[in-house]
Amino acid sequence: MHISHATVRVKAPASKSMSHRAVIAAALAQGQSRLTGVLDSVDLDRTMDCLRACGATIERRGDTVVVDGVSGLPRGGENEPANLNVHESGTTCRLMTGVVAAGRGRFRLHGAPRMHERPIGALANVLEDLGAQFVWEGKKGFPPFVLSASGFPGGAVTVDAGESSQYLSGVLLAAACARETTTVALGGEKVVSWPYVALTLQILDDFGIDVRVQTRSQGGQWADTDWRDMDAARPGHVRFVVQPGAYVSGDYAVEGDWSNASYFLAAGAVGPHPVQVSGLRMDSLQGDRAMLDILGLMGARITWSEDGVLVAPPVSGGLRGVTVDMGSCPDIVPTVAVVAAHATSRTVITGAAHLRIKECDRLDATATELAKVGAKVTTTDDGLIIDPAPIRPGAVDLATYGDHRIPMSLSVLELSGVVPHFDTPECVSKSFPGFWDEWAAVRHVVAGRAE
């Protein structure tokens, strides 16, 4: 592909999902690990602070995070519980709840008011079956709570991950620290968002933990399956067999983040100029890699090279609407919705009901803010419908709802002449503190001041 226009070039930040998991694995290991590429964000700070409260030593030294682990045994308090303040990080809350249940002592997990409205009862039920005890300080099944643990015994448990795949990931991360083999079956009715589970399995494998994934045949027999070839996990048909072992410390590099790259890839598709993003793995297991597939279906031009992936707008005819189930990539729903607002035909997004219990109701928030610039968006129980309508350029006041993904997604509107004024633009620090500095490269080219 020959691109004659000015090209925006950015480097993807480190993967938020992999950063959380890598830091946890290193903290559970024996000995010292040196992690490069760990995302510098508020959410990662929360996870690292929680791990420090459990006995790990974690220090940022330039671009490297040095971790001295707890040898598989998170340490809680005896008289006073260890203080785990997750603030607004749902990932920290769910993964750390599982992890500390494999420890010894008492742990108090709490956060911001919105976090106390986000359910965790389904995970607590599983951990109680494994010996943990919960004392709920407010509403049962919601933070804040005090968890008392005496280590994972192992055995057979069933996880209903319908509300969040992170329930399953939290149990899997902890199961490696159990005294005996743990077999984790999937319960409930909802097919689990596989990409996030695959990231957990990748980290477990990278840090030396033996996990076998088994699927059930029509005859009811269980057989080992290569999890890298899977794309979904159906309740009753998949289980995980985790052998007790030790996380292996060492050097580890975290890959780039497809979620945070999505805003720049979207900008390339909307145009008028192509955007090239480096630091992403073509073979990544991250679910949000689907952004490229969706943009391709909408008509964007996509090219991989040794310099990264380049996304350019259609040669002619404009972007097309799509019908897409985004259950495996919910974090990019707001971004896809903004791109869809520029399309020439209807877009239907489904499979995203759980976005209503994120930092805000992301479905309502996205629809409400896009309507302010003339977009025609309808919310459904599990998604959005976006119909063609002219985008109104000019200055507009937009709300962030304190949710980092809302302003980053809505920034793509700048490609259509919208000048957004966000009420709390600093909320992007939750996952991408350097976003506005990186986004300046998009503004620079659009303003006609680049090559």
Image: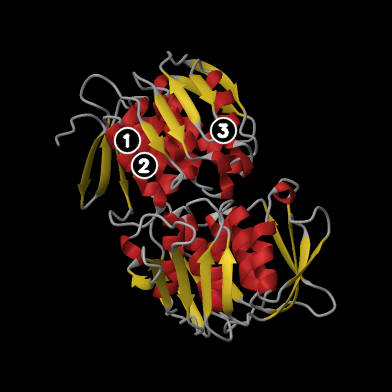
The three-letter code of the residue at mark 3 reads Asp
Where disc 1 sits, the SS reads helix
x, y (%) of residue 77? 77, 77
In three-dimensional space, the C-alpha distance between marks 3 and 2, rounded to whole angstroms, equals 22 Å
Spatial separation of the CA atoms under disc 2 and disc 1: 6 Å
| Viewer can see residue 55 | yes
Q: Which residue is mark 1?
A: 295
| Secondary structure beneath label 3 | loop
The N terminus - image quarter? top left
The amino acid type, in three-letter code, at marker 2 is Met
- Left or right of 183: which side holds 251? left
Q: Please give the residue where the numbered disc 3 appears in the rendered image.
A: 381
Q: Is residue 78 above or below residue 322?
A: below
Extreme-left residue of the structure: 2
User: Which of the image's four quarters has the C terminus?
Assistant: top left
152 relative to 259, above or below = below
CB atoms at circles 2 and 1 under 8 Å apart? yes
Q: Position of residue 231 (x, y in %)?
A: 36, 55
Tell me where residue 412 sits by quadrant. top left
- From the image, tell me which residue sits under label 2: 291
Q: Are discs 3 and 2 less than 8 Å apart at CB?
A: no
Q: State the residue lying farthest toward the front.
A: 219
- List x then y, in percent, for residue 242: 48, 77
Crowding at dot 3, Cα within 10 Å, few <14 / some 14-19 / many 20+, comes out as few
Q: Nearer the viewer, residue 229 or 67?
A: 229
Disc 1 or 3, which lies upstream in sequence? 1
Q: Can residue 61 be seen in the rendering of this structure?
A: no
The answer to the question of whether label 1 and label 3 lie on touching residues, with beta carbons closer than 8 A, is no
Say what amino acid the circle numbered 1 marks: Leu
Q: Is tag 3's residue or tag 2's residue first in the polypeptide sequence? A: 2
Q: Residue at x 62, y 36 (%)?
A: 361
Of tags 3 and 2, the one toward the viewer is: 3
